[in-house]
Image (tube, rainbow, N blue to C red):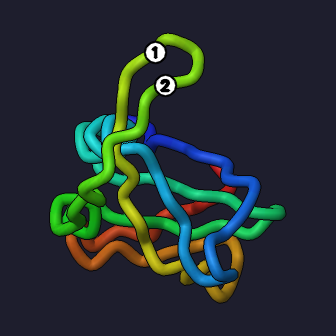
Amino acid sequence: MKKFKEKKVKKLYLKKWVSIRDYEVEKAIERGGIIISHQNVKMFLTKRNLEMSKPNSKLFKSQTGGKDYRLVDFEWKPNTDGVHFFDNESKKLINLET
């Protein structure tokens, strides 16, 4: 089983939105989902959530000479128990601590 992609974010936009680069979303889709953490609180997005997302139209240039990207915004909805998430798609309980 592929390990979910993990992403730490330093800030939330308007204290409600988390932005991820489009190429990170593609990698997360390949791995079946992503675990996003902000200030030691975690949120899980399923492959389906990621596939339904749309990148913003603005193209950002990499400041380090890397890949140019668009941002994809998700509403910040951390897991309430902080550790587990039930994925309806795979019908599995996911431990966010692993």
Query: Mark 2 is on which residue type?
Result: Ser
Residue at 64 percent across and 81 percent down: it is 14
Q: Which mark is residue 66?
A: 1
Question: Crowding near pointer 2: few (<14 within 10 Å), some, many (20+)?
Answer: few
- Residue 34 appearing in the image: yes
Dot 1 alpha-carbon crowd within 10 angstroms: few under 14, some 14 to 19, many 20 or more:
few
Can you tell which mark lies on residue 62? 2
Question: Is 84 on the left-hand or right-hand side of 85?
Answer: right
* Res 68 → quadrant: top left
Can the viewer see residue 28 in this picture? no
Q: Are discs 1 and 2 less than 8 Å apart at CB?
A: yes
Which residue is found at the position 44% from the left and 38% from the top? 3
Camera-nearest residue between 61 and 3:
61
In this rendered view, identify the residue nearer to me: 61 or 72. Answer: 61
Judged from the image, the secondary structure of the residue bearing numbered disc 1 is loop
> Which percent across, then down, holds residue 97?
68, 55
Where does the image place residue 47, in percent across and percent down from the top left? 25, 58
